[in-house]
Structures are given as C-alpha cells and as structure tokens.
C-alpha cells in the first residue's frame, strides 16, 4: 500500500494491495485528470492515458479549441459552466448570479492516517493502516479552494474520496452542487448494477447495459430510501460472481443522493456519486468551509463477489464502531409482530419469561410504550413512559426482565412528531413545513426540523432521560416517513436549500451524542424497515433493520441485494410467525431460522402463542446461532446461487478468514418433480486443505469441493433449507 507523487511525470499513484488509482496534473493550468483506476499496475509514467497528445490537445497548445478539451479530458472532478458538458461534480452561483468555475491543482499533502469529516460519518484508519492524499485545487477567479481527499487502507482494496470547499474569495458564494467523487474511463461494455426497492421489498438487484446518456439512481426523500440505495456498480459485460471487472461506488450518507453513470459522445463513461443537487443550495460565507460526504470506491478483478468482500471488510474494519463492532450480538425478541400496540407490562414479561427459558437473550419493547400512543396516529414526540400500559414504570419492567437474565431494549422514533401530541401542541412550528401550506402527512406524522438546535437539544434530552432511567442496553432508532414540504422557519430565503442536508447533519449529531453518552447501548437503525440501510447509518449503529418483510422467501432477494454491499453482521434479521404478516406465506420454522442466521438473528413473534413444535425448535436455533455467528459475522461471503436469477433456489457461503471453516446455506424455494440431486461447487476454500463435511462426516480436499463440488440430495417440499458446515482436519 502507498501513495506516491511522481514529480517528473506529475502523477499521483495510490496503490492498494491489488489496485492502482492514478491522477495526473497536466498543462500550464494544472488540470487534474483521472488517469487510471483498476487492477494494480507498477509503472508511474501513465499520463499518455489522458490522451493529451491527441487533438484537441491541451489549451496551452490549442486555445482555440479549449472547449473541446474541457469536454473530452478525463476529469478527476468535473466543474460546471465553462465547457465540460458532461455531468458536473461541482457547481456554484456567485452573488451576481454567475455560475462557471474551473479547477487547477495548487499543492498537495500526503500523510499517514486519515482525518475525520466534520459533522459527517466516514471510514476511519490510523497511521499504521491507512494513508491519505489531499489535493488542493483552486478556481483563481472566485478564490474558491476545493480539496480532493483520498484515503487507502492496507487491508482492503478500496479508495475513499471526499471533498472540502473553502471560500477564500471576497464575498459569499452559493454551492449548488458538490458531489463526492467523479471518475472518467473508457466504457468497456459496462453493465450497471443498482439496488432498487420499496417498503418491504428493499434492495433487489437490477442489472442493465449502460448506453449513451445518463443512467443511475437517486433519492429526494431526505433519506437514502427504500427505493434506490446510494450504490452502483459498473461491471464488464461478462462479470459474474467470481469473474470479470467490477467498480463499486457507495456513498457514506443517509440523505438525498445522486448516483449516476454517463456515457458520452467519445464512448467514455463518467461515474459520479454525491449529495443530490436538486433542492440543494448552500451559502458559503467568506473563509467558511463546506464538507461533502465520503464516497467509497471499490475495484475488483474477481467479479461481483470480490467487490462485496472488499466492501464488507472495509465496513467491518474501518466504518462500524462501538463496543459491538466485533462482538456477537444478543439474540433478541421484539414484540412488534407479536403484539403491535396491544401490550402491557404483564404481556411483555410473559414473552420474556418464555423467551428466556428458551435461551433468548434480550427483550425489545417496540412502538407503543410512550405518551398516549395507542396506535400509529399519535404521540410521536412525547417520549415519556405510559404508565397505564407499563404498570410499575419502565425501571420496574427492565429490572424484571434483567432478573430473567435478559437484557432490555427499547424503540424510539426521535425524528418525528404527531399532530396529536403534546409536543406538537406546544411547538407546531417544529414540524418541517412550507409557510402557509399544509404539509402532507405520512403515517399521520410530520418530520421535526433538525436544522434547529433547540429541537435537537430537546429531543436528545427527552430520549436520553428515558435511557438514563433504567438499564437499557439496546435502542431501535426508527424513521417512518420521507421528508416533504421542505421549509425551515429559521432559515433565511437564501438558505432554504440547506435544509435537507442540515436535517441529515442533525440526525448524525443526535446519534453521535447518544453513542458517546451511552457507549454500552447496542444501536440498531431502522427506517420503516430498510429505508436507511447505508454506510452513514452504519457509522453509528453496527446493525440496521433490513426490512419489515420477515418472510423467509422474500428475505432471500432482500438479503442477497443487501449483502452485495453491506456485511452480514449489519443485517437485522428475525424469525417471525406464520402465516407471514406481510405476504401470508407459510414456511417451515427451521427455514426461517436458516435465513435469519445470515444476519444478526433474533425473533419477532409471540413466543407464548406460536405452535409448540416451533417453540421446541428455538433452543436448537439458539445453539446454531452461537455455533456459527462468529463465522457469519467475520467470514468472507460467497454467493453460490441466486433465487432472484434462477427463481428456484438460493445458496450462499461464508468462509473463515483462515479458510479452516465454512458454512453453506441452501434454500430450496420450489420443489420440482423428477429432478436429480444438485451439485454445489463451493468457493473460497483452500485447495490443499482437507475439510470434513457435517452432512456425511466425509473428508475432501478443498480442490475437490470447489471444482467437482458436493452432491446435495434432492429435498421434498417447498421452502426447505439445509446447512452444510465444513471444518478443516
Ligand atoms: C417500522 C419498523 C417496524 C416497527 C414499526 C413500529 O415500520 O420498521 O419494525 O418498529 O415501525 O411502528
């Protein structure tokens, strides 16, 4: 690993173990060009890749065609308004209404370690495992400094990028677009992979060929969203799970995003990612800075699986923090699908008693414990315990649960306010709304204006007061509607375009405060299921509720798409009751356990009321979790088959880093008549090692298991599952 500046060639080269990222400075105006990103190369004299020896040449040699240069040069960070007509990365508006800017390199810094991003989540590293390059660029006319920041790590093939803008000009300026990353490269017949979805149907994989023009995904919902994850991958046309080249892009941000690939007239592709510029306008006063979020770039020459494993390692080692970062999470039971709003102390304790006798380790009290929250129409914002339901108070309940040798967790939705709440009656202006326009309700609630300090402080104190009042060891932080009717009462007219981003900064500030004051609490983010499953949230919470859809079969595609980018250790996954509450499907309890085992594992059912034979299986499932969770949480993830593609079965595998252990999970969705047993070719093992298989106690070499495969005998029945464990002998 290393970052080097080659002075003679004017080239910056960032080498990770298997990749190189190269930036070149050209011509008298110091244009910053994107030279190369891909499989590691050893030479540094690579400026020829910028094609400046071809027409239209650089402006110092051919100023009459300056615009042609701007419009074809592979830009490291494209600018608006002066002649690069492809997707821009930064756009401004001066007080006199002018818009153009052009950046030239001024200086740079290379240092060991990595700086934090003010007010924003980001990957971290220290002097022993990471290096950073800061490229100082400037627009001379505006006095605007744009710092392009890059970090690389010694244990993972990823490059992180972020952008800081400093206004050294003589007056304020408006930033109307500040993306986090831009690269230009030849279109090698790329496919585009994105993760699309909806409530209860998050992160389904979509793959299509890219064509001329712009294609990509975005959010304008104020959250990263159920609909389009802030992720895209460009893959060579033949790329499969283990072969082909793949570029992955992900944004460490939980608000509006803009994730796009553009193929232009010369057949090159520009890939950008950052905050969505729509409804974004940031007033930057003189000598003030704006920090754009961090983008993560991963290149893999080992297919989509190689990209996934890099993302997983980066996020597990350099993004997720806190006490549970590398720890097994307690098996929880959540009362949402068990009781919805219909519970009281006695009901919760009856669930806890039964659950604890079966080996479940934590009770989570979901929505409905506060204010007069008898249903989802009221009381958000009133974070005081409803003692009519929680008779004896919260501390009593928590102490009783603790006596059962269980931890206690609680649900909050801190960002929201119900019109029917004491908080709204006292502060109607705390809800985000456009003056004189009735804001639209969603789930009968509004969103609090987190750009206001007094709102954040009030909410923090009311949540923290509850957390201080009893031995609470887990918080589920929910967020159940998108933002609309964007209007901030405290913001002047020319700062209204800051509200979306300021809101996200407010959420981050609150979560930072909470994790600082309560470092022992396990935080799980949630947004109507998985509407905020993004790396920004993972910086604060090691796990995120993946989807409100707990059906084992629906979960196959949701979890496959999620695990394409995010580690299994982050995927909240529970066994729930049947018929499933979302789709009405009935699946075997055993299969539900296998599917939930691929995530954090827990239960979401009334354990006192499920069929006795299901209940009887829980101790075994608890043991299964304890046996395999280290492997699932820490191992390398391989996809063997995709139900989304074959519409019949699903299969994934995790392999320990030292390749001594592996676990294969196979789910047969639909049984088919007159078929034969299936040969499964395993992945990621050590060819030379011998492995004993749990299913038949036989021992085979890794090379046999990976090339010839194992025979999975035919299973009768739909929705059946099998676990195959291997250990080297
Ligand atoms: C959201 C969450 C659910 C549950 C409900 C409670 O939908 O995703 O798990 O907590 O809110 O209202």
Image (spheres, helix red, strand yellow):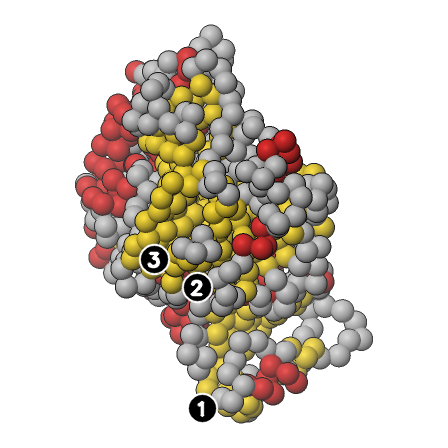
Picture quadrant where residue 678 is located: bottom right
Q: CA distance from mark 2 to mark 1?
A: 33 Å
Location of the C terminus by quadrant is bottom left
The residue at 71%/79% (across/down) is 677
**Which residue is farthest right?**
674
Secondary structure beneath dot 3 equals strand
Q: Position of residue 182 (x, y in %)?
A: 52, 44
Q: Position of residue 384 (x, y in %)?
A: 27, 31
Secondary structure beneath dot 2 equals loop
Residue that numbered label 2 is attached to = 16
Secondary structure beneath dot 1 equals loop
- The answer to whether one can see residue 333 in this image is no
Q: CA distance from mark 1 to mark 3?
A: 39 Å
Q: Position of residue 130 (x, y in %)?
A: 33, 59
Can you tell which mark lies on residue 142?
A: none
Density class for disc 2 (Cα within 10 Å; few <14, some 14-19, many ≥20) is: many
Q: Are marks 2 and 3 in contact (CB under 8 Å)?
A: no
Residue 339, compared with residue 696, is above or below; it is above
The residue at 70%/59% (across/down) is 237
Residue that numbered label 1 is attached to = 729
Residue that numbered label 3 is attached to = 131
- Cβ of mark 2 under 8 A from ligand 1: no
**Which residue is farthest front?**
61
Density class for disc 3 (Cα within 10 Å; few <14, some 14-19, many ≥20) is: many
Query: Quick one: label 2 or label 3, which is nearer the N terminus?
Result: 2
Density class for disc 1 (Cα within 10 Å; few <14, some 14-19, many ≥20) is: few
């Amino acid at each position: 690993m290393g970052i080097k500046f080659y002075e003679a060639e004017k080239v910056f080269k960032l080498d990770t173990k298997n990749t190189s990222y190269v930036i070149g400075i050209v011509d008298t105006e110091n244009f910053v060009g994107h030279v190369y990103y891909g499989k590691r190369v050893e030479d540094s004299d690579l400026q020829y890749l910028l094609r400046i020896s071809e027409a239209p040449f650089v402006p110092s040699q051919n100023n009459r065609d300056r615009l042609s240069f701007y419009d074809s040069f592979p830009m490291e960070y494209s600018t608006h308004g002066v002649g690069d007509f492809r997707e821009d990365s930064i756009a401004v508006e001066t007080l006199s209404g002018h818009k153009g800017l052009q950046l030239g390199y001024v200086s740079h810094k290379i240092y060991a370690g990595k700086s934090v991003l003010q007010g924003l989540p980001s990957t971290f590293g220290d002097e022993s495992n990471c290096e950073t390059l800061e490229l100082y660029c400037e627009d001379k006319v505006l006095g605007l400094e744009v710092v392009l920041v890059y970090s690389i790590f010694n244990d993972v093939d990823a490059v992180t990028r972020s952008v800081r803008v400093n206004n050294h000009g003589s007056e304020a300026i408006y930033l109307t677009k500040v993306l986090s990353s831009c690269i230009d490269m030849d279109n090698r017949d790329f496919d585009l992979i994105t993760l699309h979805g909806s409530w209860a149907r998050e992160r389904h994989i979509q793959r299509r060929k890219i064509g001329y023009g712009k294609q990509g995904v975005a959010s304008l919902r104020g959250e990263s969203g159920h609909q389009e994850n802030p992720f895209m991958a460009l893959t060579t046309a033949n790329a499969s799970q283990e072969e082909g080249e793949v570029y992955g892009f992900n944004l460490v941000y939980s608000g509006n995003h803009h994730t796009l690939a553009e193929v232009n007239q010369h057949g090159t592709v520009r890939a950008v990612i950052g905050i969505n510029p729509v409804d974004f306008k940031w007033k930057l006063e003189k000598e003030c800075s704006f920090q754009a979020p961090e983008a993560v770039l991963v290149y893999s020459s080992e297919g989509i699986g190689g990209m996934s494993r890099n993302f997983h390692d980066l996020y597990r080692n350099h993004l997720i923090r806190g006490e549970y970062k590398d720890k097994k999470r307690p098996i929880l039971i959540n009362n949402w699908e068990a009781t919805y709003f219909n519970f009281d102390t006695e009901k919760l304790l009856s669930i806890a008693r039964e659950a604890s006798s079966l080996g479940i380790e934590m009770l989570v009290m979901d929505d409905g414990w506060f204010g007069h929250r008898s249903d989802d129409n009221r009381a958000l914002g009133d974070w005081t315990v409803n003692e009519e339901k929680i008779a004896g108070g919260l501390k009593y309940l928590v102490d009783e649960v603790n006596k059962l040798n269980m931890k206690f967790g609680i649900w909050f939705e801190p960002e929201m306010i119900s019109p029917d709440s004491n908080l709204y009656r006292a502060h109607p202006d705390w809800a985000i709304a456009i003056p004189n326009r009735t804001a639209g309700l969603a789930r009968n609630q509004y969103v609090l204006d987190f750009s206001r300090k007094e709102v954040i402080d009030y909410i923090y104190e009311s949540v923290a007061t509850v957390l201080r009042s009893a031995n609470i060891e887990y918080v589920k932080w929910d967020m159940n509607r998108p933002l609309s009717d964007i209007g901030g009462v405290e913001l002047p007219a020319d700062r209204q375009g800051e509200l979306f981003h300021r809101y996200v900064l407010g959420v981050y500030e609150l979560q930072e405060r909470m994790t600082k004051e309560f470092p022992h609490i396990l935080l799980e983010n949630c947004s109507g299921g998985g509407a905020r499953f993004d790396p920004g949230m993972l910086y604060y919470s090691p796990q995120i509720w993946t989807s409100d859809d707990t059906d084992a079969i629906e979960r196959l595609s949701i979890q496959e798409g999620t695990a394409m980018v995010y580690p299994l250790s982050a995927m909240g996954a529970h066994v729930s009751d049947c018929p499933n509450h979302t789709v009405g499907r009935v699946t075997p309890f055993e299969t539900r356990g296998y599917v939930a085992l691929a995530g954090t594992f827990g239960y979401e059912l009334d354990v006192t009321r499920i069929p006795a034979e299901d209940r009887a299986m829980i101790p075994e499932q608890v043991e299964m979790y304890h046996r395999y969770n280290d492997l699932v949480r820490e191992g390398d993830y391989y996809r063997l088959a995709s139900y989304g593609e074959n519409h019949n079965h699903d299969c994934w595998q995790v392999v320990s880093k030292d390749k001594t252990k592996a676990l294969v999970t196979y789910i047969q969705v639909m049984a088919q008549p007159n078929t034969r047993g299936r040969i499964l070719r395993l992945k990621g093992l050590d060819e030379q090692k011998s492995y004993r298989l749990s299913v038949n106690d036989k021992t085979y070499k890794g090379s046999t298991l990976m090339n010839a495969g194992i025979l999975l005998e035919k299973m009768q029945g739909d929705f059946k599952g099998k676990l195959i464990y291997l250990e080297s002998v």
